[in-house]
Amino acid sequence: MVFGPLPQYLPTFFLNGHQVGYTDCFCYVGITFQSTARNIFRSHYIAKAAKARKAGFAVFGVEAYVGVLPPKEGRMLYMSCVDPHLVSGADVVIDVDKSALDHLEKVQHAFLRRLLGLGPYSLRAPLFTELGLVPIRYRRLILALRYLGYLVGLTAGHYARAALEDSYQLFLNAGQGYWTDLVYALQQLEFPVVLPPLQSLTPAICSELGKAVYTSAMRSLDGQIDNSTRLYLLHARREPFEDEPPKKVTAVLRHYLELVVNASHRKAITRLLLSQHPLAVERMRYKQRYHRVLVPRDERLCRFGCRSVETVEHALFFCRGKVELIEWREWLADAVPDQGNAIRNVGPWNATSVLRSLIFSRVSVCQVAKVAHKVLGIFAEEPMVWPDGA
């Protein structure tokens, strides 16, 4: 393998009497190098993304035997079968090439979307906040800093320590190398993390840097959630834990993913929360094959002729276009007696808060998930009413 410009005449090499051929791609101690690409690790990203994708397909293959994979078990299988491929080489291969990292991110997003029952255009932040996972970009950086802590703890005569010091000197001389890449990757985060000079680093400081990267990831996810109007139901959410008071947690395996056992009901409440439902307020955000004009929100009206915007609150609490909708509304009020009066007397001014109280309660989440499944199914059976000219 030859790096850099090739000479006019390539020399011939022999090993034990056998000619050694040239190659532009080779795997050494698990890391694939490529001499003809701008990023010498590009082939490594592509190869590991392909293996992670195959592992993901194998994981979901169990659904042919056990049914829909529950999120808790799917998360465990992801961490044991898919994640090892996605983080392969993260300790030494620093993510400075966005196009290469995209290969890994696409695999992660596709797996988590399928696990939650979401479509390919769902927002990305909830994939991590709902399952308690970390975006692969941040996870790989945390592992890189953990390895850095190991390196700085080595004695001066260790080869790996010498290589680290050499990389640091390259950085000081404006050269490229491991340290330069690590500094760049940390600075490119939405909430950057500063890497101190090598002389002041200790394993404990590297551990704190890893925590800072995790905090940066959580702040980024919080910002994406809070700045999205589509995820308004998740704003200021307090997670209802079983053995402690509700509190704000950015990323954790959510209660409804564990408590709602019925897969259809669980997917319905997930899609309702994350704006992946079939109601007009969401579906008319996008251009479609026969409807190429974007529809303003106040014109995304109920398909049953109610002359109100077809929102989640309208579908669950107010729509009277179908008898079945009214019956399921009454069923919900009877099934959750503590909030029965609130459901029957709900108005436009408090519909969102009532819906939140129903979903973010360990007592009522299963019942509201069942009603969400039935109601969204009723709406999905009827075509949407597009405004004239849309």
Image (spheres, rainbow, N blue to C red):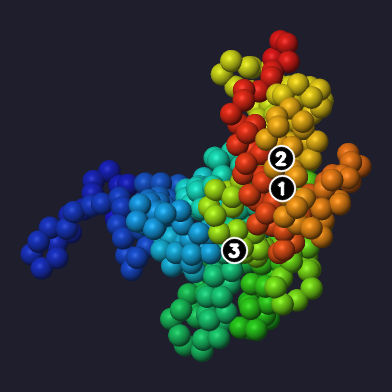
Any part of residue 308 in sight: yes
Classify 10 Å Cα crowding around label 1: few (below 14), some (14-19), many (20 and above).
some
Which percent across, then down, holds residue 149?
57, 79
Q: Nearer the viewer, residue 99 or 14?
A: 99
Residue at horizontal 72 percent and vertical 63 percent from the top: 363
Residue 274's place in the image compared with 218, above or below, is above
Distance in Å between CA atoms under marks 1 and 2: 6 Å
Assess whether mark 2 and mark 1 are in contact (beta carbons under 8 angstroms). Answer: yes
In the structure shown, which secondary structural element does the residue marked by tag 3 occupy? Answer: helix
Numbered mark located on residue 388 in the image: none
Q: CA distance from mark 1 to mark 3?
A: 23 Å
Residue at the spot of label 2: 327
Question: Label for residue 331?
Answer: 1
Question: Contact, CB < 8 Å: mark 2 with mark 3?
Answer: no
| Kind of residue indicated by mark 1 | Trp
User: Going 34% across and 56% down the picture, which residue do you hit?
Assistant: 65
Secondary structure beneath dot 2 equals: helix
Residue of label 3: 258
- In the rendered image, the quadrant that contains the C terminus is top right
